[in-house]
Image (cartoon, coloured by chain):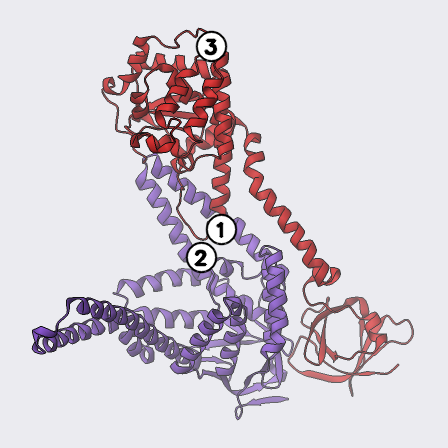
Amino acid sequence: MNGRTGSDSAFQFEGTWKEFAPIAFTNLLLTVVTLGIYRFWATTRERQYLWSRSRFVDETLEWAGTGKELFIGFLLVAILFLLPFFVISQVSQALILRGQETLGVMLTLLSFLMIFYLAGVARFRALRYRLSRTRWRGIRGGSDAQGFRFGLSYMWKNFIGYIALGLLIPWSMVSLWNERWSKMSFGPHRFEATAEQGPVFIRFLLFYLAPVILFFAVFIGGLLAAGLGLSGGFDTIDPNNIGATFVLVTFLFIFGFYFVLGLIAVSFYAAFYREVVGATRWDSVGFSFTASTREWVMLLLGDAVLVVFTLGVGYIFLSYRHWKFFITHLEADGEIRLDELTQSTTDTSRHGEGLLDAFDMGAI
Amino acid sequence: MRALSASWYDGKTAVRHIGTARLSSESRGFLVLEEDGQPPLDIPLGDMEYGEKLASEHIYRRASLPDFRLRLPADLPPAFIAVLPAMRSYGGWVDRLGLGKALVAFTAVSVAAVALFMTAPEWLGPLIPTSWERQIGDAMIGDLGNKLCSTPEGDAALTKLLDAVDPEKTKVRAGVANMGMVNAVALPGGQVLLFDGLVQQAETPEELAGVLGHEVGHVRERHVMTSILRQFGLSILLSGANSGVGNTAFGIASLGYSRDAEREADAYARSRMAESNISPLGAAAFFERLGGDTGEDSAEPALTGWIASHPAPGERAKAYRDSAREGADYPPILSQQEFGSLKTMCDEDEDVEEFGFF
């Protein structure tokens, strides 16, 4: 039995926000009355819904994770990492207070280095956890790697990325994506990721140079305006007016600066995701991600409007919007031999994405 | 028994099995899945677990085969509902209680937990052994070393003052800090500091005894430990925000105590002074000079440090004045010479360092 993907999009989202709303609101309510502890079960219910309404070819996905394992993952992180970190920060403060500045600062730096490392491990393990809890036709994914080596790569690649005046950041992002996904598998097949930094580098450079370009543009513009103003005649210049204009121009400039910079950043991320997803394969299935910069901007603006106009309550719908965006723009092409698609032999971790939770990051 | 249409995955390959599901007729202990050309699959009902509800289907799992998935239609006949595991949606406890009851129960538990947490410093502080507090304090502050003024005569005078207001066998540690600020603090670990600025402001040794007694009161009534615990709780709550507010030992001391704690410390000082036959009028005069009955406006700016975090000076002065015994003749606690040696302590200590907060 073979499943052929292609003509229509292989990934389809079939959920509606009306179906999602009761889940989101009861989750919010239960999370509030349990002082946040229900959060783990809330996440699980949310994912069960989102996964079950996401169709790949002819079968929906299934989320097989549980709230309990997420909760245990969180407790483990709290005991193994947050508590020691808290103690270290207290100890280093005491050391600084006692005049042992060097030792105190060293200890603080060391603990931050540790966090940096664990952030990398966490990103790896979160993806592994999510794949291992995702079922399609009863088959799951996972990874045999624990993510400890990825943590090291994460540290040095990011370090290199920033140390070269930030110019190697696209390289580090792309290379970390490849490293992470190449360790993952679904069923018997490994993922392969061979993304390159070339296609995204121009947009990164644009983002990188934008502040400089904008600064000079404004500088020259200012000079021109001053020149025009001077030639316009002295008698019409009202000092108060100049002050107001100046404030307005400054305001517009600062607003415009962040807006333009934000837009360029989004366009970089749009290109980044098109590149890395497009360069990821699973057996004979290739993937692509079709969201354009404009669609990303609409998503983010929609988020902002939704949250602002509901006085924050709309926040509970963001996970729905983001997942829908992800699934609708994800495409796959290739052939799947169902009888060869056997169960994954990877180990499954018994606890959830505690580490990631602690660092509050996304998995994909 | 009517058979239902069913589909399942065995969890070993991605091949979908399509067939029917029926309950075994004899003992009703099994769910039987039948597929054309395949032997029937018997699943013990006890092995079945509820998975989730889709738009038009239920998904069941098996405890013994974690990846096995069975889909049955959403409108199950009563015979199946009776023997299949019950639907789960919110999570074990909520499903068992029902959403409404669970909300009420969780709210009650949460309110109780918050109340316990908020009041924990008050009842937990005094339960912590003094020796622990001393170790915690030492770890937080360390050795103040040469930042305290010390001369043989001055030390002797301070010890005399301390003896009068601290009857316990293991005395709190007291010192005069080489700093011009008009202030006094009780630090974690049972360490009390009078700042040189305050010593200079004092006109009689009784005034110093009042202030010292007050700070010793904070230590003995375990306000310091309470404050540390409160700060600890806050920093746990704020650990995500990493506010850095009052994160130091001095931050704790200067964050201060509740008004009730201040009154308790005053009461402690008054009863110790009464026991040691020290006139409370000196302390009263001190408070009157600080703020007086006219309110805080008249306070000398330099003196506001100590009073800002304390109850109104007028009220305190009155309490001290009222505690004086009618017509009693209190002997002076220190001789003029002893008092003088306290005042010159910081000038005469050759190798004392400027007291800083770090």
Residue at the disc numbered 3: B277
Q: Are marks 2 and 3 on the same chain?
A: no
Answer left or right for B331 relative to B346.
Answer: right
C-alpha gap between disc 3 and disc 1: 55 Å
- Mark 1–mark 2 CB contact (< 8 Å): yes
Residue A206 to residue B131: above or below? below
Mark 2: which secondary structure? Answer: helix
Q: Which of the two discs, 3 and 1, sits closer to the camera?
A: 3
Q: In what quadrant of the picture does the N terminus of chain A appear?
A: bottom right
Answer left or right for A213 relative to A102.
Answer: left
Question: Along the line of sight, which residue is nearer the eye, A261 or A78?
Answer: A261
Residue B37 to residue B11: above or below? below
Q: Colour of chain B?
A: red
Q: Colour of chain A?
A: purple
Residue B254 to residue B111: above or below? above
Q: Are marks 1 and 2 on the same chain?
A: yes
Which mark, residue A81? 1
**Whether residue B272 is visible:** yes
Badge 3 sits on which subunit? B
Q: Amino acid at mark 1?
A: Phe
